[in-house]
């Protein structure tokens, strides 16, 4: 059963392929500008005006925003400060659009969802492809002729893995560590139920650019569990949940084009190996 209680606003913490926090002595939050960020998108994320964001950072021209810049976000709560880090570059390969290609036909032929294709390219629903245009396809390139795999594909196959037989939020087919080893991708089945590994309070439950719907659970012991790539969410911010509560349904992770759950765990702001994180 889900119970609700009011909680103070908490900052969503970002990390490699997900979200993580790192302490900073500054009073403001610090946003590290990622590829695709704009003054408009950042102002929406923190629910402040574009004018306030630009004034606070002495920015006269919004078009001069560059990846890696540190933007100070005016503090509105007494929550602990955090640095929000840019996510790692998603895995993709380039495809040259041919005559009569559509987003739907490309998505179908490449085994990815239409939304994943739109997300990784930043396309709107009304976007029309142009012949000769190069677009990103989530995942790794198809195997080369003769059954040989590309170097990127081979590197992916030798990535560090975790034991899929222990309890995960979904029935794990495979568990791969991300490049930073701070989080994992848990391969499951599309629309499969995502179950919380612990009890706790839902401190975030909403879409996050590039990661679908995201739920973050905080325990009384100071652990935070981030569940990303949810197709839908079954909980809301402020819910007090028990272990095994359904958080939502598994969706397609844009970076891989597959039903991969993003799981990242921290304890009092420090990263924790998800395979070793408490399950209670």
Image: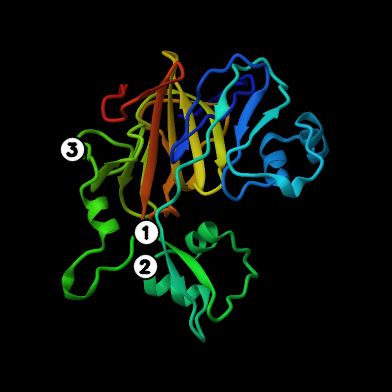
Near mark 2 (Cα within 10 A), the count class, few <14, some 14-19 or many ≥20, is some
Name the quadrant of the N terminus: top left
Q: Are marks 1 and 3 in contact (CB under 8 Å)?
A: no
Q: Residue 111 carries which label?
A: 2
Marks 2/3: CA distance?
27 Å
Residue 75: where, in percent of width, then height? 71, 22
Q: Is residue 102 above or below residue 164?
A: below
Q: Residue at x 62, y 66 (%)?
A: 125
Q: Are marks 1 and 2 in contact (CB under 8 Å)?
A: yes
Residue 233: where, in percent of width, then height? 50, 43
Residue 186: where, in percent of width, then height? 31, 43
The residue beneath circle 1 is 139
Q: Is mark 1 on a helix, strand or loop?
A: loop
Marks 1/3: CA distance?
25 Å
The residue beneath circle 3 is 165
Asked whether residue 249 appears in the rendered view, the answer is: yes
Q: Residue at x 82, y 33 (%)?
A: 55
Q: Residue at x 19, y 36 (%)?
A: 163
């Amino acid at each position: 059963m889900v119970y609700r209680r009011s909680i103070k606003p908490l900052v969503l913490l970002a990390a490699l392929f997900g979200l993580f926090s790192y302490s900073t002595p500054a009073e403001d939050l610090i946003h590290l500008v990622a590829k695709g960020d704009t003054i408009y998108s950042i102002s929406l994320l923190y629910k402040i005006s574009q004018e306030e964001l630009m004034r606070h950072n002495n920015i006269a021209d919004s078009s001069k925003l560059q990846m890696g810049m540190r933007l100070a976000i005016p503090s509105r709560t007494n929550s602990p400060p955090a640095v929000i880090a840019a996510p790692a570059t998603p895995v993709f390969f380039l495809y040259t659009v041919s005559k009569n290609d559509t987003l739907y036909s490309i998505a179908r032929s490449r085994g990815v969802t239409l939304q994943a294709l739109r997300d990784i390219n930043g396309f709107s629903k009304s976007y029309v492809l142009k012949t000769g245009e190069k677009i990103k396809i989530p995942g790794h390139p198809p195997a080369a002729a003769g059954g040989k795999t590309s170097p990127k594909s081979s590197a992916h196959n030798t990535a560090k893995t975790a034991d899929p037989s222990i309890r995960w939020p979904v029935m794990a087919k495979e568990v791969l560590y991300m490049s930073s080893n701070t989080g994992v991708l848990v391969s499951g089945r599309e629309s499969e139920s995502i179950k919380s590994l612990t009890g706790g309070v839902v401190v975030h439950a909403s879409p996050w650019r590039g990661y679908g719907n995201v739920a973050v659970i905080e325990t009384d012991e100071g652990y935070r569990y981030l569940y990303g790539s949810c197709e839908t969410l079954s909980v809301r911010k402020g819910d007090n949940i028990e272990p095994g509560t359904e958080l939502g349904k598994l969706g397609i992770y844009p970076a891989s084009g597959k039903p991969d759950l993003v799981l990242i765990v921290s304890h009092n702001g420090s990263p924790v190996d998800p395979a070793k994180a408490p399950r209670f």
